[in-house]
Amino acid sequence: MSIQPSATPSVLFVCVKNGGKSQMAAALMRHHAGDTVAVHSAGTRPGSSINAQSAEAIAEVGADMSTAVPQPVTPELLRSVDQVILLGGEAVIEPIDGMTAPVTTWLTDEPSQRGIEGMERMRLVRDDIDVRVRALLDDLAPSVR
């Protein structure tokens, strides 16, 4: 699926707590895209902090989410982006008036279902999200790759 690019395409990554997967996706997109894509991250029920293992796994590949703070999904944010990506099956976004962005769900790898925990789990989650982020970047801004 090709997304119609705007001058600077924008994407919103959403998970429930906005402390792990959506922040990882946002950090990876910023890392790969620089300022060619406007990147946002939010949660449907934001937590109070960033997952430390998520931040560590992201830092291992040269990206940074260490200063990120969980944020709520707002109607203004939903109306302002070109693409909404839900990470995992728990977060749900209902379209609102004035929202034009398609909503896509990424059912990301969950290594804990296979008994894999800790940093090994987080690296597998990161790598799965990274592959998806790179493919999305190719659709949003193919000229920057």
Image (cartoon, rainbow, N blue to C red):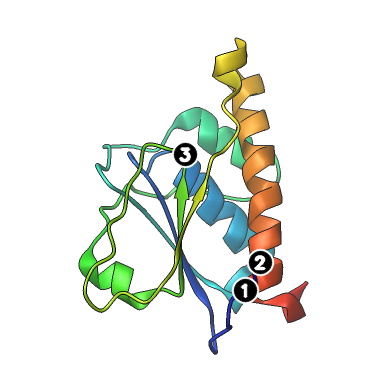
Q: Secondary structure at mark 1?
A: helix
Q: Is residue 99 above or below residue 45?
A: below
Tell me the amino acid under the disc marked 1: Leu
Q: Tags 2 and 1 in contact by the CB under 8 Å rule? A: yes
| Residue underneath mark 3 | 88
* Nearest the eye: 43 or 31: 43
Asked if the residue at tag 3 contacts the one at tag 2, i.e. Cβ–Cβ closer than 8 Å, the answer is no
Is residue 8 found left or right of 59 in the rendered image?
Answer: left
Q: Is residue 1 left or right of residue 99?
A: right
Tell me the distance, in whole angstroms, between the alpha carbons under discs 2 and 1: 5 Å
Mark 2 closeness class: few <14, some 14–19, many ≥20 residues within 10 Å: many
Q: Is residue 3 visible?
A: yes
Q: Residue furthest front?
A: 1
What x and y, as percent, mark residue 119? 61, 22
Of the residues under marks 3 and 1, which one precedes in the sequence?
3
Classify 24 as above or below 111: below
| Vertical position of residue 102 compared to residue 5: above or below | above
Instruction: Give residue 140's mark.
Output: 1
Q: In the rendered view of the protein, which quadrant contains the C terminus?
A: bottom right
Residue 87 drawn at (x, y percent): 47, 45
Q: Is residue 62 visible?
A: no
- Residue for point 63% across, 56% down: 133
Image location (x, y in percent) of residue 128: 66, 40
Q: Amino acid at mark 3?
A: Gly
Residue denoted by label 2 = 137
As helix, strand or loop, the secondary structure at mark 2 comes to helix
Picture residue at 53% right of the left edge, 87% below the top: 6
Which residue is nearer to you in this view: 65 or 1? 1
